[in-house]
Amino acid sequence: MSLKDWVDNGWLRVHETKPTDIHELLKRAEKNLSESYKMTGDPDWQFNIIYAAVINLANAALMAEGFRTRSDSGHYYAIESLELTVKLESHIVNVLDSFRKKRHIATYERCGVISMDMVEQILRITQDLQKRVLKWLKNKHPDLLKN
């Protein structure tokens, strides 16, 4: 299935992307990661901040391809799209999706569901994802990195 098929299914919409869109998403992801390094003592909140960086990076890749998520299940489709955009391995996408579910519980249902091991794991994945997205953008969409 392609991203165009996702539009046909109503999961995404076409987006006319500007370099400023990509710049802002990458800047937010960097800020989220930077802030997460300063946080101690609250794994739920630290996890949430790192997760936000994942979504920013996924959306940057999706927008570079000319698409945006719709509001319904936007995080789910942003994460799933990483397999089609930056060719992220399916097992990592599955881990990120499990983190999406954990983050939802930690944010809306109850505190204390995030361990420091999970924080460390999402941090490692996100740091790698950031490098991959930047490399992919430089190779596939260098025009969108001009600001």
Image: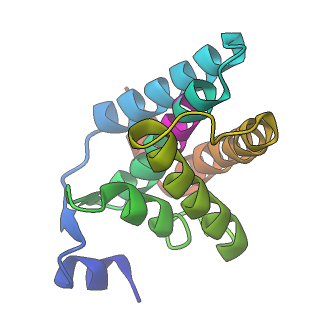
Residue 130 x/y as whole percent: 63, 41
The residue sitting at 67% across, 28% down in the picture is: 43
The residue sitting at 63% across, 69% down in the picture is: 94
Residue pushed farthest bottom?
1
> Residue 136 lies in what quarter of the image?
bottom right
Q: Main secondary structure of the magenta part?
A: helix
Left or right, 135 with respect to 118, comes to left
In this picture the colour scheme is rainbow
The residue sitting at 78% across, 34% down in the picture is: 116
Q: Is residue 109 magenta?
A: no
Which is more toward the observer, 86 or 93? 93
Residue 57 drawn above or below residue 48:
below
Residue 88 drawn above or below residue 144:
below
Locate the N terminus by quadrant.
bottom left
Residue pushed farthest front?
110
So how many labels did they put on this image?
0
Q: Is residue 53 magenta?
A: yes
Residue 9 drawn above or below residue 69:
below
Left or right, 30 with respect to 38, comes to left
The residue sitting at 71% across, 72% down in the picture is: 91
Locate the C terminus by quadrant.
top left
Residue 124 x/y as whole percent: 78, 41
> Residue 122 lies in what quarter of the image?
top right
Left or right, 138 with respect to 128, comes to left
Residue 20 x/y as whole percent: 30, 30
> Residue 42 lies in what quarter of the image?
top right
Which is more toward the observer, 104 or 91? 104
Which is more toward the observer, 115 or 28? 115
Q: Which residues are magenta?
A: 49-54
